[in-house]
Structures are given as C-alpha cells and as structure tokens.
Amino acid sequence: MKPLGEAAKSGKQILIALIIGLVFAPLLIFGLNLLFHINPTLSLGLTLAMVVPCSSMAIAYTGLSDGNLELATIVVALSFTLAIVTVPGWLKVFASSYHLTISAWLLIKTIIIVVFIPLFFGYLTRVALLRKMGVEGFEKIRPLFPSISILGMFAIVTLIFYGKGKARGRQARCGGNCNGTSGIILCHHTFVFDVL
C-alpha cells in the first residue's frame, strides 16, 4: 500500500487524467455526435461509452508499457468513485431525451465489488507472496502479471461470446449477464494489478 500512498501525492497527474477521462472525453463525443449527425440510438451508445470511466484494463495497458501502475490504479479507483456523480450528470445533460434512470446505489455497489474488494484481496495476495517468496522471489515473478491479466481477459471474453452465443441460440437477450461479465473483467484486472 505504500507505493499507492506515494502515487497519491502526484496530484497534477491524477487531476489531468481525471479531467481527460471525466470531462474532455464526454464533451468530445457530444461534439462529434452533433458534428456528424449520428443516429440517436448510436449517439446514446457512444455517449454511454464515453461517460462511464475507464476500465481497469487501463491498468493492464499501463503495466505493459512499463508505466506507473500505482498511479493508474488510483486514477481508475477515483474515476469509478467519481462516476457516482459524473455518469448521472452527463447522462442528464446528454441523454435526457432517452428517459434513462441511473441508480446511485447500483453505482456504489458496482464500485465496491469491482474496485475495492479485488483491491483488498490483491493486497492480501501480495503480502502472502512476499512472505512466502521474499522480495527477490516476488520480483522474479512480477513481470508475469501483465501477461496473466491479458490471458484472463481473453478467457473472460471467450466466456462472454460463449454465453451470448448460447443465449442467442435460445432466442434470449443478454440482459444482466453482460453487466456481470463486465464486472468479472474489472475485478480480475484490479486484483491482478494490486498484486503487482
């Protein structure tokens, strides 16, 4: 947890990342929707994709590019926490004509499940690995974690397509299953990168 505390002191970088993700990106997609006169349904989908904060896969990309994992973890956690306010706010501004309702409790529950629980278990795993292997042993296996994360993501994507194919075979809609698998992806990546 000490590296996370040190990364939390990088206020300027955190602020820039949050402004880009939570302010600039939604405004950009809104402007593009207006500029190109995009179909209203597609416009709503693009708006939703841009107002929801980045997934923890951003942490995986940061790890693959030898970036600051702790800073990326803080940005993802803060993005999800601020999403309680920003997602309903942007949707009210951009998508009010679609009559959408967003449950604040659902957002809070999702943040706890997707960010904080895996973060806690990732920290416990890291402590256990450090005790068992020591710092040198842990540093030897540390480069494997981004690859494990990518493999886990591929496995989850395969399960999503399998589930969708199975559902389409029964002429059923995906419904809540898609949200659950998205949560699994986010939990997996948050857990793996907290171990780092």
Image (cartoon, rainbow, N blue to C red):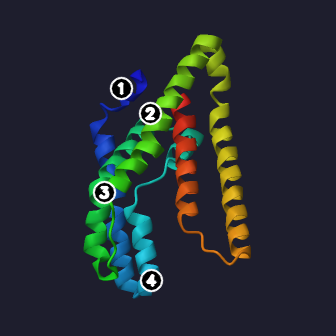
Mark whose residue sits in front, 1 or 3: 3
Horizontally, residue 91 falls left or right of residue 187, namely left
Q: What crowding class fits label 3: few (fewer than 14 Cα within 10 Å), some (14-19), or many (20 or more)?
A: some
Q: Is residue 194 visible?
A: yes
User: Distance from label 1 to label 3 (Cα)?
Assistant: 31 Å
Rendering coords of residue 142 (x, y %): 62, 27
Horizontally, residue 91 falls left or right of residue 1, namely left
User: Distance from label 3 to label 4 (Cα)?
Assistant: 24 Å
Q: Indicate which disc, 3 or 2, sits on the residue closer to the N terminus.
A: 2
Rendering coords of residue 77 (x, y %): 39, 43
Write down the residue under mark 2: 70
Q: Residue at x 40, y 60 (%)?
A: 52
Q: Could you tell me if the residues under marks 2 and 1 are in contact, i.e. CB atoms within 8 Å?
A: yes
Q: Is residue 69 visible?
A: no
Circle 2 — which element?
helix
Residue type at numbered disc 2: Glu
User: Distance from label 3 to label 2 (Cα)?
Assistant: 27 Å
Say the numbered circle drawn on residue 104: 3
Q: Nearer the viewer, residue 126 or 62?
A: 126
Circle 4 — which element?
helix
Q: Indicate which disc, 1 or 3, sits on the residue closer to the N terminus.
A: 1
Residue type at numbered disc 1: Glu
User: Distance from label 2 to label 1 (Cα)?
Assistant: 8 Å
Q: Could you tell me if the residues under marks 1 and 3 are in contact, i.e. CB atoms within 8 Å?
A: no
Q: Indicate which disc, 2 or 1, sits on the residue closer to the N terminus.
A: 1
Count all numbered tags in the image, as a single digit.
4
User: Distance from label 4 to label 1 (Cα)?
Assistant: 43 Å
Write down the residue under mark 1: 6
Q: Does residue 100 sit above or below 57 in this rendering?
A: below
Rendering coords of residue 125 (x, y %): 56, 24
Residue type at numbered disc 4: Thr
Say the numbered circle drawn on residue 41: 4
